[in-house]
Image: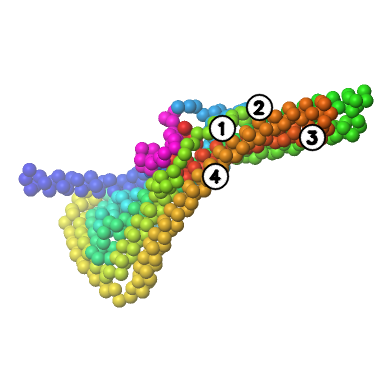
């Protein structure tokens, strides 16, 4: 291809560009139609995808490897989340027409979808994902464009149309610089309003601009210029860890409420059985009084014992209903909905002998909150480096280049013949760095504070493990004591029944033995619940409590 052909092809491309600019109103209309597709629902879908994508990536980075790297002390079985899709979620009826008996798994599944605080935590995590997506957008190529059209008319002046457009892109460079490129064009046209023959006079112009700015001292380096992006990426990891810890605490709280209802169910049953025994005894004593084989005092004592048992049953039933209503709120369900909980007792004792030193070491290695505390020391370290950089002199390099097509009468004959460039180097001496000096001192103090905070957090974790092991041991002993108390009370009831028959004791002694047996049974289920909550809480403190998407603990 010869020089003449090259110029011909270049002029053809310039003419095509000018014709595009001369169709500014039509281009603006097309752009308006395209932007009309960016409706609010579409923007919502884009935001959902962006936020969830950031959260899912951070979750995969934090949660998935956790089960493989966890340290488990001897005597403890770590939980493990079941595979995705292992079970379907419960479809709870909306109307309160049919009593629904919920298992613990059902309750956890419902709560993770309906509990208000749980939703708020998920939304906060999603917003953190959006913040990361925005930071990534701000540090990537950013395109901007404009179209303008101006119509001028008046008495004694010709009608004129001015159309202009530009498109540009800017990007933050790896070492803190900024690169910008822009293409602009303008078409000015005077409209022939005389009605005579001829063309409307017009002029067209276009320009290409490139610019680069790069700090060489203060502000130089990716760690300095991209700190907001780096911190946003760290913050999403911290948010995922915090949400996972919230889920663990949420599950433990709901388990405690669920098993508390189970314990109240058994307490109601025990109280009803006790009332049945006392009613039978009252009837028997009254019959003996009628035939003269028992005195009035004993008959009245038996009747009072029955009334006391009825009153106790009413109180326990009221306590159960109140707790059930609170449980509905905890699940995020309407209080008017008719639900109940299945009679699911916690499993039998499962923890073995746990060595404190080994448990503490595992907790220090596993706990997500300690990982965050350690990572925050790194954040403070970067802040110190940034503050140290901020006290340096300002030395900035600037480079710009412009290529212009001057205004011509023929819009199709644009010629990019004019060009210019500039190179600048600007130095600002650090004569006033008082604010930066103070910021550097503050950054170093903040780093030392974060180190002390980590030490404090580790001490608290060790203390939690020590207290958790004590609580678990105490709960295990309490179960044994409660079961021994049941055995003793059962023997005492049999003995009291025999002595009552032979007349060696009165109804008051027999009633006391019967009530003691009921109380021992109530204590047993409460101690079992305490043990289960203490066991799960210890797993949480050790950092080995794993949940599925519904918050269900998988053993």
Q: Which residue is mark 4?
A: 471
CA distance for labels 2 and 1? 23 Å
Which numbered disc flags the more N-terminal residue, 1 or 3? 1
- Count of numbered badges drawn on the protein: 4
Q: Is residue 79 left or right of residue 499?
A: left
Separation of residues labelled 1 and 3 (CA atoms): 34 Å
Tell me the residue at 23%/64% (across/down).
Answer: 216
Q: Which residue is mark 3?
A: 509
Q: Earlier in the sequence, mark 2 or mark 3?
A: 2
Q: Earlier in the sequence, mark 4 or mark 1?
A: 1
Residue 346 has which mark? 1
- Which residue is located at x 70 percent, y 38 percent? 319
Q: Disc 4 on helix, strand or loop?
A: helix
Secondary structure under the numbered disc 2 in the rendered image: loop
Mark in the foreground, 4 or 1: 4
Please tell me whether residue 99 is drawn above or below residue 198 in the rendered image: above
Q: Which residues are magenta?
A: 60-85
């Amino acid at each position: 291809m010869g020089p003449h052909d090259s110029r011909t092809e270049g002029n053809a491309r310039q003419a095509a560009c000018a014709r595009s600019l001369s169709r500014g109103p039509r281009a603006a209309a097309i752009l308006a139609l395209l932007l009309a597709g960016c409706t609010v629902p579409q923007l919502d879908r884009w935001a959902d995808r962006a936020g969830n994508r950031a959260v899912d990536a951070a979750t995969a980075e934090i949660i998935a490897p956790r089960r493989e790297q966890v340290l488990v002390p001897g005597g403890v079985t770590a939980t493990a989340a079941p595979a995705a899709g292992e079970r379907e979620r419960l479809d709870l009826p909306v109307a309160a027409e049919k009593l629904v008996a919920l298992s613990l798994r059902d309750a956890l599944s419902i709560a993770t979808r309906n509990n208000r605080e749980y939703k708020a935590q998920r939304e906060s995590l999603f917003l953190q994902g959006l913040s990361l997506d925005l930071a990534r957008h701000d540090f990537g190529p950013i395109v901007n464009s404009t179209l303008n059209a101006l119509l001028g008319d008046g008495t004694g002046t010709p009608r004129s149309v001015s159309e202009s457009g530009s498109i540009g892109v800017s990007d933050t460079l790896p070492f803190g610089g900024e690169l910008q490129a822009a293409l602009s064009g303008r078409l000015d046209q005077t409209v022939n309003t005389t009605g005579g023959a001829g063309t409307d006079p017009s002029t067209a112009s276009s320009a290409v601009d490139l610019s680069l700015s790069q700090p060489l001292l203060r502000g130089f380096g990716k760690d300095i210029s991209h700190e907001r992006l780096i911190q946003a990426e760290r913050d999403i990891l911290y948010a995922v860890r915090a949400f996972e810890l919230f889920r663990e605490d949420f599950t433990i709280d709901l388990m405690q409420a669920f098993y508390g209802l189970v314990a109240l169910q058994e307490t109601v049953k025990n109280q009803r059985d006790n009332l049945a025994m006392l009613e039978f005894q009252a009837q028997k004593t009254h019959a003996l009084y009628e035939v003269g084989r028992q005195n009035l005092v004993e008959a009245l004592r038996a009747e009072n014992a029955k009334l006391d048992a009825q009153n106790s049953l009413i109180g326990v039933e009221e306590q159960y209903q109140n707790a059930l209503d609170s449980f509905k709120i905890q699940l995020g369900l309407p209080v008017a909905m008719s639900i109940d909980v299945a009679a699911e007792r916690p499993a039998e004792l499962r923890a073995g002998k746990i060595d404190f030193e080994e448990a503490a070491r595992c907790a220090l290695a596993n706990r997500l909150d300690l990982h965050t505390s350690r990572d925050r020391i790194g954040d403070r370290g970067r802040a110190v480096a940034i503050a140290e950089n901020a006290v340096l002199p300002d030395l900035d390099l600037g480079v710009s280049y412009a290529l212009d097509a001057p205004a011509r009468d023929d819009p199709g004959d644009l010629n990019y013949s004019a060009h210019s460039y500039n190179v600048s180097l600007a130095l600002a001496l650090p004569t006033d760095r008082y604010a930066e000096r103070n910021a550097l001192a503050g950054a170093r103090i903040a780093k030392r504070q974060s180190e002390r905070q980590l030490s404090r957090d580790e001490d608290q974790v060790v203390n939690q493990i020590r207290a958790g092991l004590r609580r678990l041991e105490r709960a295990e002993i309490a179960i044994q004591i409660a079961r021994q108390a049941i055995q003793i009370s059962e023997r005492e009831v049999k003995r009291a029944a025999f002595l009552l028959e032979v007349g060696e004791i009165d109804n008051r002694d027999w009633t006391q033995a019967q009530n003691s047996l009921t109380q021992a049974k109530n204590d047993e289920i409460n101690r079992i619940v305490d043990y289960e909550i203490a066991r799960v809480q210890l797993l949480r403190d050790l950092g080995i409590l794993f949940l599925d998407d519904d918050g269900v603990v998988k053993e």
